[in-house]
Amino acid sequence: MRLSPEGNIFVYPLIIISGVFSCLWLVDKVPIYWPASFGLLLIFCLNFFRNPKRLVPNGKNYIVSPADGKIINIRSLNNDEYQSISIFLNVFDVHVNRMPIRGEFSDIHYTKGKFLLAFDHNACDQNERNTITFNTVIGPIKLVQIAGLIARRIICYAQKGKTMEIGDRLGFMRFGSRIDLILPKKVRIEVKMGQKVMGNTTIIGTFE
């Protein structure tokens, strides 16, 4: 199982601590719940920071999901000029964020805010978030990384003026979050409310 480097700060210390408490338990220095507790936390982090290899589907003129999760909102914006697709990531989903389409970054704007539940639709306006704008063959697209109730770190690898290919690692959200993908109206949405999606695998929309 491949791990995301963003998890090293958690995983490696937990390996050491779990090992130390396991050794102490073997010589009757600590009760069993100490190594068991840190062992369970280690297992949780190994699962959370997993980084499975994902291949972009063959073909062209499509937009792939930027993350694993569940579609919790599809709505029109700016007098139907744009449309927004919201993906909620629970703590058991893969939290790597990926490029939905090839694009050149034109703006990255970080906003401090609250830590509401990520599936609360007020979260997109009030929570801590990072708005990434990039130019594509179908015009400008925005991807908003939104922190959740326990998420306290938004990681973004986008750099203004740089280009990323479809499927490239765009960032990471630690411990629960939400992604809002804002697309031009001409994109034909291929997902529906409540659907589970997979980053780099599920086709979110298609275009001519």
Image (cartoon, grey):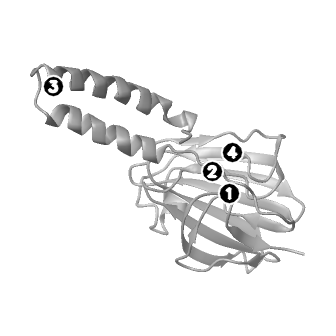
Q: Could you say whether the residue bearing mark 3 is in a helix, strand or loop?
A: helix
Identify which amino acid the numbered label 2 is placed on. Asn
The reply to whether the C-beta atoms of the residues labelled 4 and 2 are less than 8 Å apart is yes
Q: Is residue 186 visible?
A: yes
Give the residue furthest to the front: 26
CA–CA distance between discs 4 and 1? 13 Å
Residue 130 can be seen in this image: no
Amino acid type of disc 3?
Trp
User: Counting other residues with Cα less than 10 Å from the Cα at mark 4, is it few (<14), some (14-19), or many (20 or more)?
Assistant: some
Reading the image, the residue beneath label 1 is 143
Q: Which mark is residue 169?
A: 4
Q: Quadrant of the C terminus?
A: bottom right
Which residue is nearer to you in this view: 42 or 191? 42
Residue assigned mark 2: 97
Task: Tell me the residue that label 3 is attached to.
Answer: 25
| Secondary structure category for the residue under label 2 | strand
The mark nearer the N terminus, 4 or 2, is 2
- Quadrant for residue 36, please give it: top left
Dot placed on the residue nearer the N-terminal end, 4 or 1: 1
Sequence-first tag of 1 and 2: 2
Spot occupied by residue 67 in the image (x, y as percentages of width and height): 61, 57
Disc number lying in front (4 or 1): 4
Estimate the spatial distance between the alpha carbons at disc 4 and disc 2, rounded to whole Å: 6 Å
